[in-house]
Each structure stands twice: as C-alpha cells, then as structure tokens.
Image (tube, grey):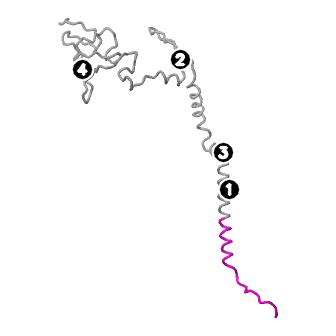
C-alpha cells in the first residue's frame, strides 16, 4: 500500500478524561442549581403544609397592638360595682409617644418616683441583712401595713405581741386594727 503514513490508532486518554470530568461537574452543578431553585420556589408552600398557619393569630395580634399603641381613646367600660363598693371611673389610653414624655426620670429625683404619694426619703426598715425589721417609731407608708385594713388604727399604738394579745388589755387583737381598748384589764 502506498500513500501517506497514518497516525497510530491510539486513544487520546487525556482528552477523554478531561471531557468526562467537565461533564460530571456540569451535571452536578446543574442538579444543585435546579434543587435550589425549586426549594426556594416551594418553601412557602412547604412551610404552610408543615405548620398550617399556626403563626397567623400571633401576627394578627401584633398588628392590632402596633395599631393601637398610637391611638387615643377610652378603655373598656368598667364593670358594674358590687353592693357597697364605689363606682369605678372610666379610664382612657393615649399614644405611646406622648406617654413617654410624661414618664418621670428616676435619675433626676429618685425619691419622688410616685408624685401622688410624695417624697420617699425616710427609711421605714433597718438596713440590715435578712428579714426587714421596722425602725421603732417609723410610720408605715400607705398600703404597707398589716391587719384588718380598717382606718381606725393609729401608727402611735405599740405593736402587739406575736400571740396577738396586747400587753395591757388582756384581749386578743389583730395587729393594726386599733380595736383594743387600753387599760381594760381583768
């Protein structure tokens, strides 16, 4: 046979390996991209299928509260008073921005945090560790007394003993009630 010399019949293994690796990488990248696309596209549907809108009441409540925080108006009407109780007054609410302006700055005057009750600059308990011990002769503030809650008692009366008997009367009394008569011994 005559003619030009032929190349040898050997495979180009380097080219085949390079094309195979590039094809495998391309298939892997395309599969990953399609999964990410469909996962992103169906995430809302999957979330609704998994949880069934359990957060809807919370979102609705928060939206209603955020809407009401900047409004003015009356609060719910007070209930009818029971027999012997005074009628309750109607209350109102205001916008949070205006309410923040009315808040007292505790750094300015820490002794006057409750202006209705007045300054709180006198201690009524001893500054010691453990249970609070009342300073002798200190008058308790409003709402801090114990007993039956009647207003007839006096802060100047001596405290009763732990058994509930007054030292001079011999009759059992509730602490702070002021119902024991002094000097009515047996």
- 21 in the magenta segment: yes
Point out the tag, 1 or 4, that comes first from the N-terminus. Answer: 1
Q: Secondary structure at mark 1?
A: helix
Q: Nearer the viewer, residue 23 or 82?
A: 23
Q: Position of residue 31 (x, y in %)?
A: 67, 59
Q: Are marks 1 and 4 in contact (CB under 8 Å)?
A: no
Q: Residue furthest right?
A: 2
**For residue 3, side relative to residue 42 (left or right):** right
Contact flag, marks 4 and 3 (Cβ < 8 Å):
no
Residue 175 position within the rendered picture, expressed as x and y whole percent measured from the top left: 27, 15
Q: Identify residue for label 1.
A: 34
Q: Residue at x 66, y 57 (%)?
A: 33
Q: Is residue 177 magenta?
A: no
Image coordinates for residue 26, horizontal then vertical, percent: 67, 64
In the depicted structure, whether residue 30 falls above or below residue 47? below
Mark 1 crowd level (few <14, some 14–19, many ≥20, 10 Å Cα): few
**In the rendered image, which quarter contains the C terminus?**
top left
- Using the image as rendered, state which of residue 173 and residue 41 is in the foreground: 41
Question: Given contact means CB atoms under 8 Å apart, are the residues at marks 2 and 3 in contact?
Answer: no
Residue that badge 2 annotates: 92
Label 2 – label 1 distance at C-alpha: 57 Å
In the picture, the disc for residue 135 is 4
Q: Which mark is residue 58?
A: none
Mark 3 Cα within 10 Å, few/some/many (few <14, many 20+)?
few
The numbered dot on residue 45 is: 3
Q: Secondary structure at mark 3?
A: helix
Q: CA distance from mark 1 to mark 4?
A: 78 Å
Please name the residue shown 62% across and 38% down the image.
53
In the image, which is nearer the foreground, mark 3 or mark 1?
1
Q: Answer above or below: position of 2 versus 12.
A: below
């Amino acid at each position: 046979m005559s003619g030009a010399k032929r190349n040898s019949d050997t495979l180009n293994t380097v080219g085949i390996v390079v094309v195979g690796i590039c094809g495998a990488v391309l298939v892997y990248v395309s599969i990953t991209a399609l999964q990410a696309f469909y996962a992103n596209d169906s995430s809302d549907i999957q979330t609704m299928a998994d949880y069934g809108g359990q957060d809807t009441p919370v979102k609705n409540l928060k939206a209603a509260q955020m809407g009401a925080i900047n409004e003015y108006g009356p609060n719910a009407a007070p209930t009818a008073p029971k027999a012997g109780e005074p009628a309750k007054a109607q209350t109102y609410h205001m916008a949070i921005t205006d309410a923040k302006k009315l808040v007292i700055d505790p750094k300015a005057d820490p002794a006057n945090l409750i202006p209705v009750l007045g300054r709180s600059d006198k201690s009524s308990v001893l500054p010691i560790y453990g249970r609070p011990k009342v300073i002798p002769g200190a008058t308790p503030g409003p709402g801090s007394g114990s007993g039956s809650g009647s207003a007839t008692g006096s802060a100047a009366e001596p405290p009763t003993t732990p058994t509930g008997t007054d030292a001079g009367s011999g009759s059992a009394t509730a602490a702070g009630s002021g119902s024991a008569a002094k000097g009515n011994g047996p």
